[in-house]
Amino acid sequence: MSLIVGENSYVSVDEATTYFADRLFADEWESSPDKDKLLIAATRCIDRLPIKGIKADRTQALEFPRALYSYSRGINPYHDPLRDNLHTLPGWVVQQDVPQAVKDAVCEEALSILKGGQEASKRADLQRQGVTSFSLGSLSESYSAGLLASSMRLMSAEAHELLAPYLGGGYHID
């Protein structure tokens, strides 16, 4: 599958290469033959997170840009997002473009996938399965039971921090 910005990735290879040109400890990116695959994989990881709001356009392939309802405007948010045009509804804030923080997070996650590779993926799989400790010869590792057991984690802490303003977790109840 080839990379198509807006369809399966938020970032082109050229954008990512420009991003990494100014970043320390990103030398692996230059020599990687799998840049397309890494960016697509990172985008998929991000799109699996619980993101606030809804897609800005119901026909878009990816989760960003988003539409968010502002309760402070005092308008009833109940509507049919499949029928209504959110750009014209009072109280809705609709992003026109993918935020730069999301693009940067894709780059950071892609680099973490590249650096961590299969070993980090195996550790994440164990954590998602609820494993809190394992030993192999003289090596042993322990994980916090609640911290990393979620299947909605990124390999990159930096990517997660960049996405924090967009992530859900609490919900408004009237």
Image (cartoon, grey):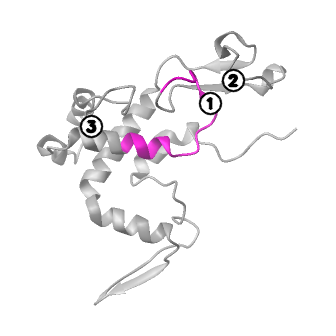
How many C-alpha atoms fall within 10 Å of the one at disc 3: few (<14), some, or many (≥20)? few
Q: Quadrant of the C terminus?
A: top right
**For the view shown, which residue lies furthest in the bottom direction?**
137
Precedes in sequence: disc 3 or disc 1: 3
Task: Please tell me in which quadrant of the rendered image residue 21 appears.
Answer: top left
Precedes in sequence: disc 2 or disc 3: 3
What amino acid is at disc 3? Met
Q: Is residue 14 left or right of residue 161?
A: left
How many C-alpha atoms fall within 10 Å of the one at disc 2: few (<14), some, or many (≥20)? few
What amino acid is at disc 1? Ile
Q: Is residue 50 left or right of residue 15?
A: right
Q: Which residue is mark 1?
A: 54
What amino acid is at disc 2? Pro
Instruction: Please tell me which residue is depicted at 48% across the width and 55% down the height of the picture.
Output: 153
Instruction: Please tell me which residue is depicted at 47% across the width and 19% down the height of the picture.
Output: 97
**For the view shown, which residue lies furthest in the left direction?**
31
Q: Which residue is mark 3?
A: 1
Q: Quadrant of the N terminus?
A: top left
Instruction: Please tell me which residue is depicted at 28% across the width and 59% down the height of the picture.
Output: 116
Q: Position of residue 37 (x, y in %)?
A: 26, 42
Question: Is residue 59 rendered magenta in the image?
Answer: yes
- Nearest the camera: 144 or 63? 63
| Residues shaded magenta | 42-60
How many C-alpha atoms fall within 10 Å of the one at disc 1: few (<14), some, or many (≥20)? some
